[in-house]
Amino acid sequence: MTCCSLSYAHILGFASFLAAFLLALVDVSFAAAPLFLFVLLCLIAPFLPQFGFFLPVISRGNSGGRAVSITFDDGPDPYSTEPLLALLDRRGVKATFFVVGKKAAAHPQLIEKILKPGHLLGNHSYSHDNLCMLKSSQHLRKEINAAQETLARFGVKTLAFRPPVGITNPRLGGVLEDLGMINVNFSRRGMDFGNRRIRGLSTRVLKHLRPGHIIALHDVMPKRRGDLQLWLDETDKVLQGIEDRGMKVLPLPELMGLPVMIRTSDSGGG
């Protein structure tokens, strides 16, 4: 996104005002309709993770092959991330972890374990404030920068940001542009509500899975600790189901054709 680029919001906003003006020439009572529809769209658009209304949003890949990518949000978690890494290693899968900055700071050893086998990191804000998109540009910048500074301790600069719950707003595009980052959301998710709804996870993910999809799951401990193995089994079923459908799991940069992170040094931090 460049400084002179126009978002769908800009274009439709201009079109709405033009339509309102032209309708007012016919009957002034009609003029409010396009403006009302535009405002309604502005209220709905932030909650549609695949809809780049206010800024460019990447929610699927363009590799052209029968492949998908898998991502995990909200970690790292001291109980669930490590067994997940073991599962991914057995499957030979490379994932992207959109980590929460304060959790990364609290569990540096898990960040090292994510990076060591070649998994990638994305920025999922510092505190995972679900209401951060209702706040100022200054607050957004602070959340994203704090997570970036935390990951820099591990010799990593991530280029991909995923907002909490995939929600966007009109201010996010400018903040990401200034930081040289892209917004990466998703096209398939298990509606697991942060691993609060585990049963049937694989069925929900696989039901309408298509090549190019970016899958969003979570690597946080299930609400009930007794469901940890169930969650791992469901995640394994997702990976098996991808294979059964004749697809493979590609690292996110290969699926998107864009880098997710760069190494700024070979040594990690703690």
Image: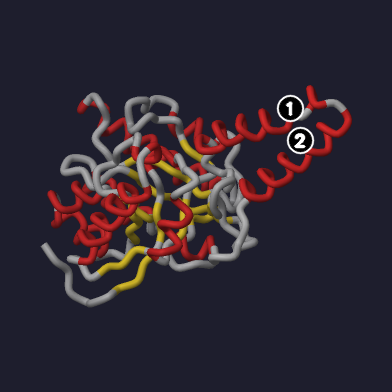
Which mark's residue is nearer the viewer, 2 or 1?
2
Res. 251 in view: no
Residue at 88% across, 30% down: 26
Q: Nearer the viewer, residue 142 or 56?
A: 142
Residue at 71% across, 40% down: 17
What amino acid type is highlighted by mark number 1?
Answer: Ala
Q: Is residue 5 above or below residue 190?
A: below
Q: Is residue 45 left or right of residue 159?
A: right
Q: Is residue 26 left or right of residue 136?
A: right
Q: Is residue 100 left or right of residue 56?
A: left
Numbered circles on residues, count = 2
Q: Which residue is mark 2?
A: 20
Residue at the limit of the structure toward the bottom, as seen here: 265
Q: Secondary structure at mark 1?
A: helix
Tell me the quarter of the image containing the C terminus. bottom left
Q: Position of residue 60 (x, y in %)?
A: 56, 52
Q: Nearer the viewer, residue 86 or 252?
A: 252
What amino acid type is highlighted by mark number 2?
Answer: Ala
Mark 2 neighbour density, 10 Å: few (under 14) some (14–19) many (20 or more): many
Q: Are marks 2 and 1 in contact (CB under 8 Å)?
A: yes
Q: Position of residue 63 (x, y in %)?
A: 60, 63
